[in-house]
Image: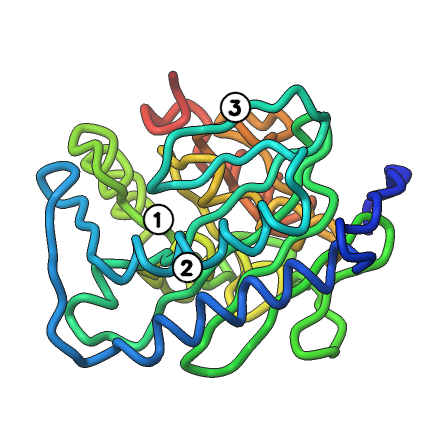
Amino acid sequence: MTSAPQPQVPTSRTGRQAMDVVTEAARIAGQIISDRFHTSLQVSFKGRADVVTDVDLAAEKAVLELLRDEYPDFGVLAEESSPVDTGSPYTWVVDPLDGTRNYSMGVPHFCTVVALAHYGETVLGVTYDPVREEMFIAEVGKGATVNGRPLAVSEKEDIESAVVAFDLGYVDEKAGVALDMIRSFWPNIQGFRLMGSSALGMAYAAAGRVDLYFHHALSPWDTVSGLLLAREAGGEVVDRQGERAGLHTPSVIASSPRLIQSFLQATEGHPWRQG
């Protein structure tokens, strides 16, 4: 797990611990998402293939109402809302529904993300899968768990023995380069998984359910909890150049340090690693 000291997050306006507020917020969003799954949705497009539904908006509204009520002085960075900068060192980061394309097509693989950053570093985060009722939780210096069970990243040591998960995002040129890189691996790898939810992809890497997860174009709300989950599970998250990834780093490679190194060596000089 990370050795970074944990800041003393203040209690909420009503005297609650921040983690209690975060988990409640995630469950509220999860309930809204679950109740509307397989129902008629209002779907619109933010980009060619980037969809948003009325459920995204309803879940985010409910989450932000709770967070703002309990911590009115904290900033907010949420996918479907304008950012709020209060001058506080603390910022809530929220993705009400990660995996909206899966959700809108009836594929039961999506989640909600609620996390708290302190000066841009995630200090606690939750990725909640309401279908499987799995709550992935991480707190700085306290490890990572799913439903109370400790998480640990993969023990695989080389890319040839790994199952690699990834997503393509909405930047077509970068997605094509990523597919070229995947093709360059085959068949010298155990398998690939296209997740459809980057937050669950990073959570699964933290849990060792996949050996490594990568992406080239993410937003803070996609990665905020996964950064801490992976590190508290004994792993690391780096960018395409192999440098430590942060909240505003678009590209991520999440796994154990040894497997990340194997991935970087195998992809050395590939166009995906550039930029």
Mark 1 element type: helix
Q: Secondary structure at mark 3?
A: loop
> Pointer 1: residues within 10 angstroms few (<14), some, or many (20+)?
some
Location of mark 1 (residue):
185
Amino acid bearing label 1: Phe
Distance CA(mark 1)–CA(mark 3): 18 Å
Residue 140's spot in the image, x, y percent? Answer: 80, 48
Q: Quadrant of residue 195?
A: bottom left
Q: Nearer the viewer, mark 3 or mark 2?
A: 3
> Disc number at residue 241?
3
Q: Against 62, is 244 above or below? A: above
List the single residue furthest toward the top: 275
- Judge by depth and name the residue closer to the eye, 37 or 196: 37
Residue placed at 39% from the left, 19% from the top? 274
* Residue 58 shows up from this direction: yes
Residue at x-position 89% and y-position 42%: 8
Q: Quadrant of residue 243?
A: top right
Say if 127 sits above or below 243 in the image.
below
Q: Residue 170: x and y, percent?
A: 21, 38
Q: In the rendered structure, which disc, 1 or 3, sits on the residue that comes first in sequence?
A: 1
- Between circles 1 and 3, the one closer to the viewer is 3
Cβ atoms at labels 2 and 1 below 8 Å apart: yes
Looking at the rendered image, the quarter that the C terminus falls into is top left
Amino acid at circle 2: Ile
What x and y, as percent, mark residue 7? 87, 38
Q: Position of residue 80 (x, y in %)?
A: 33, 42
Mark 2 element type = loop
Q: Amino acid at mark 3?
A: Gln
Q: Is residue 212 left or right of residue 8?
A: left
